[in-house]
Amino acid sequence: MPSVNHEDRTVSFKIVYCGSPLSGKTTNLQQIHAKLDPTGRSDLVSLSTAQDRTLFFDFLAVEADALPGYKTTFHLYTVPGQITYNATLQLVLRQADGVVFVADSQMDRQRDNLQSLQSLEANLRMNGSELERLPIVLQYNKRDLPNAAPVEYLEYLYNNRATPFLSFESDARTGRNVLATLNAISQAVLHQFRQRAAPHDSSGAAKEMRTQELAAA
């Protein structure tokens, strides 16, 4: 859930990038870090291993003028893709406001993607949440590779649901649709925040909140 400090007029949201090992989670954050104005984001903190570039988590704070009168910060995390780091995934997912699931488009990585998605769903349940209650954006990464599965097949595997999630084709290595994914999940998170805040805001201020894009995609 978002952290709101009315005294300091600040609100912060937690967005977690999940996915199978080496699917492009860390590369997403590296591209975001490189593309955004340094005055509007923190340094990128990353811990790595030989097996997966993310051991515990990557962290990046992005500031945006998204809620009038409040300094808005999005805290971006990635988590390890290996199932052996399940406890870390559960910890980082705690109180997440939104999730980006990064799927490796390569045909031979679909079993790993499915295992990661199942792990995500299981850990959300252990934290008292579920996919359908959180803003979710799917990113089909590595679309530039020759063995990339058809998007229709990926949609069938991961997005065959009553209310499909918003999805993007991407090549995180070149930055294609990296910021578009970030903008989509940030807008979805803010939309849910406004919906939940509106019944408690007799002044109507919540209805006037507008989402601004963090950067041009």
Image (cartoon, rainbow, N blue to C red):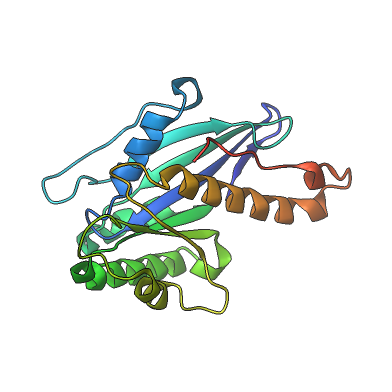
At 73% from the left and 33% from the top, the residue drawn is 68
Residue ranking furthest to the top: 39
Residue ranking furthest to the right: 203
Task: Examine the image and state in which quarter residue 5 appears.
Answer: top right
Residue 186 sits above or below residue 165 on the image: above
Where residue 185 appears, as percent x and y from the top left, is: 53, 51
Kindly tell me whether residue 95 is visible in this rendering.
Answer: no
Whether residue 76 sits left or right of residue 111 in the image: it is right
At 88% from the left and 43% from the top, the residue drawn is 203
Whether residue 169 sits left or right of residue 197 in the image: it is left
Residue in front for this viewpoint, 11 or 211:
211
Where residue 53 appears, as percent x and y from the top left, is: 20, 45
Give the mark count. 0
Residue 3 sits above or below residue 124 on the image: above
At 32% from the left and 46% from the top, the residue drawn is 172
Task: Examine the image and state in which quarter residue 10 appears.
Answer: top right
Kindly tell me whether residue 216 is visible in this rendering.
Answer: yes
Where residue 101 appears, as percent x and y from the top left, is: 39, 59
Where residue 153 appears, as percent x and y from the top left, is: 35, 76
Residue ranking furthest to the left: 50
At 55% from the left and 61% from the top, the residue drawn is 134
